[in-house]
Amino acid sequence: MGKTHARIEGRLRSFIEAQPVFFTATAPLAGDGTINLSPKGLKGSWAVLDELTVAYLDFAGSNAETVAHLRENGRITLMWCAFEGPPNIVRVHGKGEAVFRDDPRFTELLARFDGFDVSQNGLRAIVVVTAELVRDTCGYAVPFMTYDEDRTLHGSRFAREDDESLSAYFEKKEDIATSIDGLPGLPLPLPPLRA
């Protein structure tokens, strides 16, 4: 049934890279803090950087819970499910970090997402996750569902924003600079995009 893997390689890596959606889970240290679970999509917006490191592009949204939790404690779990083909679930448990636009590593990391149009979707940061535990499980109870295509609404909404207007958008949102639980979220004002 379940198996622990030392590395993200071979069929495991191929599986992760082929999925159209994955999920992130984070939580603050406070026992009564808000647990966050988020779906992530958009083809080409995540990458396996090496045998123990994955990354994804963090886009504009209504909150910044994942970023806030990572800034506080770094704990994160990523999960990919097979909705087509043989059943499978892969989880990467690890430590994550939000690499912001003004970080010297940002441009080099962004180059790993070759072919992804970063002028769309309001790119805020790149989340880098170092795996501490990699497991796959059967996924027998996950239903079959088909992937038709990425939604274009998010991209068309945020493509019309420049750095200044995107920063202004974030500053108006209640749970961007500070999380639901009052933790530091996305640093504002948003630095210019260094692509």
Image (tube, rainbow, N blue to C red):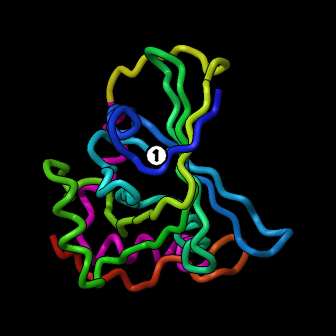
Residue 47 lies, with reference to residue 137, above or below; the image says below
Q: Nearer the viewer, residue 83 or 189?
A: 83
Rendered-image quadrant of the C terminus: bottom left
Answer with left or right where residue 21 lies relative to residue 78. left
The total of numbered circles placed on residues is: 1
Quarter of the view holding residue 32: bottom right
Q: Is residue 7 magenta?
A: no
Q: Residue furthest right?
A: 32
Residue 99 horizontal/vertical position (percent): 37, 75
Using a 10 Å C-alpha cutoff, classify the residue at mark 1 as few (fewer than 14 neighbours), some (14 to 19) or many (20 or more).
some
Residue 147 horizontal/vertical position (percent): 39, 22
Quarter of the view holding residue 1: top right
Q: Can residue 59 be seen by looking at this rendering?
A: no
Residue 127 horizontal/vertical position (percent): 41, 65
Amino acid of disc 1: Lys
Answer with left or right where residue 194 lies relative to residue 173. left
Q: Which residue is at a point 61% across and 67% down the rendered structure image?
A: 75
Q: Which residue is at a point 36% across and 32% down the rendered structure image?
A: 11
Q: Which residues are magenta?
A: 150-178
Q: Can residue 125 be seen by looking at this rendering?
A: yes
Which residue is tagged 1?
40
Answer with left or right where residue 80 lies relative to residue 140. left
- Under circle 1, the secondary element is strand
Residue 49 lies, with reference to residue 89, above or below; the image says below
